[in-house]
């Protein structure tokens, strides 16, 4: 059976490599494992690796939120443009249907 120190080294080495490779899913999985099995008595190097991994996940989450916000803003912008076009054409559509100040019905005098 391997020693606990060797298991810790492998976990943190894998975590460091996953962060360097930008493999977010692997970072997430390994960070959970390192926190579950090696959260006490960490060395400064282990703390630095765990902090870097946590920051990687936080950046990934912020990027996802920013992308979702951009998609929402784009959809809202498209909807606003459509509403503006409808508002611009509304008077002509009303007059065509016999409603409005220029329809000739005399009701707007």
Image: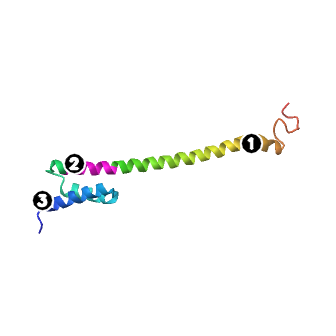
Residue numbers of the magenta segment: 46-57
Q: Is residue 100 left or right of residue 46?
A: right
Q: Is residue 17 left or right of residue 97?
A: left
Could you tell me residue 50's position as x and y percent?
24, 51
Q: Are circles 1 and 2 on residues that touch, CB within 8 Å?
A: no
Our reading of the magenta stretch's main secondary structure is: helix
Q: Is residue 10 above or below residue 109?
A: below
Marks 3 and 1, how far apart at CA = 74 Å
For residue 54: magenta? yes
Question: Extreme top residue here?
Answer: 109
Q: Earlier in the sequence, mark 3 or mark 1?
A: 3
Q: Quadrant of residue 83?
A: top right
Check residue 5 in the rendering and tell me which mark sits there, or answer none: 3
What quarter of the picture does the C terminus occupy? top right
Q: Nearer the viewer, residue 11 or 79?
A: 11
Q: Is residue 93 above or below residue 18?
A: above
Q: Residue at x 34, y 57 (%)?
A: 24
What quarter of the picture does the N terminus occupy? bottom left
Q: Earlier in the sequence, mark 2 or mark 3?
A: 3
Query: Which residue is label 1 attached to?
Result: 90
């Amino acid at each position: 059976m391997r020693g606990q120190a060797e298991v810790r080294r492998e976990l943190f080495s894998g975590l460091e490599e996953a962060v360097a490779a930008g493999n977010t899913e692997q970072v997430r999985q390994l960070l959970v494992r390192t926190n579950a099995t090696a959260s006490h008595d960490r060395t400064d190097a282990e703390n630095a690796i765990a902090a870097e991994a946590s920051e990687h996940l936080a950046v990934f989450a912020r990027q996802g939120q920013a992308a979702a916000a951009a998609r929402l803003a784009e959809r809202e912008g498209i909807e606003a443009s459509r509403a503006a076009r409808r508002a611009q054409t509304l008077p002509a559509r009303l007059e065509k249907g016999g409603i409005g100040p220029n329809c000739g019905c005399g009701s707007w005098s």
